[in-house]
Image (cartoon, rainbow, N blue to C red):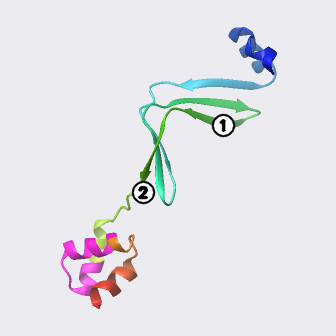
Amino acid sequence: MSAMMGMNPRKMKQMMKQMGIDVENIDNVEQVIIKTSEKNIVFNDATVSIMVVKGDKTYQITGTPQEVPREIEISEDDIKLVAEQTGATKEDSYKALKQTDGDIAEAIIKLSE
């Protein structure tokens, strides 16, 4: 493998093409976000490459990752539903939904106590 590291990039690309491997960069990437249930992993300086091998695409992200806590999104419909069910204000309904990570039933119970 170390012999390939000193190889001419053009020759390397030609060899990869012969093996059915195609690599291309995605230009003008502004940001890449990987969302998990607990956090977001954000790359603001990402370089993204796509490697196609036998029809399968693999995306490679290079950059500096920054872990950010996942912000729960509360819809206006959920706020309205909780407010209607409990008689609470929209502000209180929103706060209850945030505290319960968006769980409508739990927010209703919390405000009904």
* Residue at which label 1 appears: 58
Residue 56 vs 9, above or below: the answer is below
- Labels 1 and 2: the sequence-earlier one: 1
Residue 43 placement (x, y as % from top left):
46, 38
Q: Which amino acid does label 1 sit on?
A: Thr
Magenta segment main secondary structure: helix
- For mark 2, give the secondary structure: loop
Residue 2 vs 86, above or below: the answer is above
Frontmost residue, 55 versus 10: 10
For residue 70, which numbered disc appears in the image?
A: 2
Q: What residue type is labelled 2?
A: Arg
Identified at 76% across, 20% down, the residue is: 16
Is 85 part of what is drawn in magenta?
yes
Q: What stretch is highlighted in magenta?
A: 82-98
Identified at 50% across, 60% down, the residue is: 37
Looking at the rendered image, the disc whose residue lies closer to the viewer, 1 or 2, is 2
For residue 82, which numbered disc appears in the image?
A: none
Quarter holding the C terminus? bottom left
